[in-house]
Amino acid sequence: MEDRTDLRLEDEGDARITEMLRDVYAPPAEGAYWDGLETRIMSYIKAHRQALIPVNWWSDLANWAAPGLAAAALLFIAAGALWSRQNNEDMRTTYDAVTESLASDVLPGAVQVVTAPRDGSSQREATFRYVLSH
Amino acid sequence: MPEKLDGTSGEDTLAEPQRLTVQPRISDEERALVSLAKGGDERGFAGLVRLHQRRAYIVARSIVLTHEDAEDAVQEGFLRAYQALDRFDPAQTFGAWLNRIVANAALDLARRRKVRNAEELTESIPTAFRDPAEGGELRERLEAALAKLPERARSVIVLHDIEGFTHAEIGEMLGIPGGTARSDLHHARQKLRVLLGNLRD
């Protein structure tokens, strides 16, 4: 048994309203109208198909996982190589500076390497100290 | 069992599960069309449109105020159904699933219209598919009264009293329990009667 109940009308007034409601809400009867609506709906769907959100977007994402990982690995290797090269250069520069400094201390008359003062004093002051030391 | 004007009836004592056991069967034709459409065949979906557009129009028209808005809601509803076709459960009927989507599209459209033209809407007379002049003044007053009803109240009256949907079906379409649809119907009828007081005389 279904729960449909007809609008039970007590008087002619309700019957009149129901009749008018049927009239107001009556769907178009012509077959041509429905053919036209079907065409319109299908055209609308075709026009908006590009905007469709893929339902299985995660599977699309999974397809990009392998190339993404490979690219990330290449980037990591390149960054590592660059860092290693830079590190070697820094070590070499430090080594050269230390050996030169040692050489000037041991050998009198050798060229003294004057480094820029760390306390922020001016270049002029450094030059003055160089002249005094000679 | 007849329902009285105060909305009460012996039907209220029926157990809800008993009502819900009535399930329309999906036809072989519909199943084949769904299968085709899911496989990306446009003819399959066009066939579903042909089968269901009339009922979809009735559902949309019960919610929105004009024939033109009903067409727009049907169109939008079918697009949403097309987009969500992969999520359609073949165990249920396509029509019931589609009607719910169309009802949502119609409710969205009705709310947008309401927000946009709040002032204008309450004063305007909605246009019907047929010539609005043919029914004369009484019809205009009926349409104006319908426009004053909330969308849900209007739709339960039309879907139940004019189109013959059950409370459970209406509830499913509008996303409310069947009992709420029944109660909405009762209040909607009362409100409509007040609005049309002297029209009934």
Image (cartoon, rainbow, N blue to C red):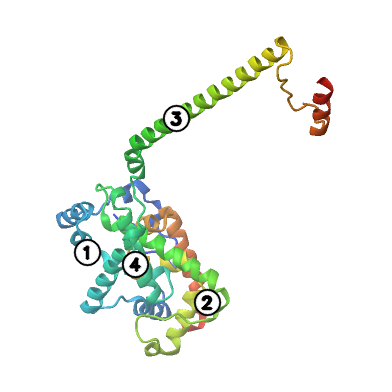
Q: Which of marks 4 and 1 is nearer the N terminus?
A: 1
Decide which of A17, B132 is in the foreground and name it: B132
Return the mark for residue A58.
none
Would you name the residue on which mark 3 appears? A76
User: Residue beneath label 1, please?
Assistant: B46
For the point 32% across and 51% down, the residue is: B19
Residue topped by disc 4: B74
**Type of amino acid under label 3:** Phe
Residue at position x 28%, y 69% in the image: A43
Residue A129, x across and y down, in percent:
83, 25
**Taking A85 as reference, is B43 left or right?**
left
Q: Nearer the viewer, residue A32 or A85?
A: A85
Which chain letter matches label 1?
B
Dot 2: few (<14), some (14–19), or many (≥20) neighbours within 10 Å?
some
Q: Can residue B55 be seen?
A: yes
Q: Do the residues bearing badges 4 and 3 touch, measured as CB atoms within 8 Å?
A: no
Viewer-proximal residue, B39 or B4? B39
Q: How far apart are marks 1 and 3 (CA)?
A: 52 Å
* Cα distance in 3D space between marks 2 and 4: 21 Å
Residue B142 falls left or right of residue A105: left
Q: Do labels 2 and 4 share a chain?
A: yes
Residue to which mark 2 is pinned: B121
Q: Circle 1: is it few (<14), some (14-19), or many (20+) Cα within 10 Å?
A: some
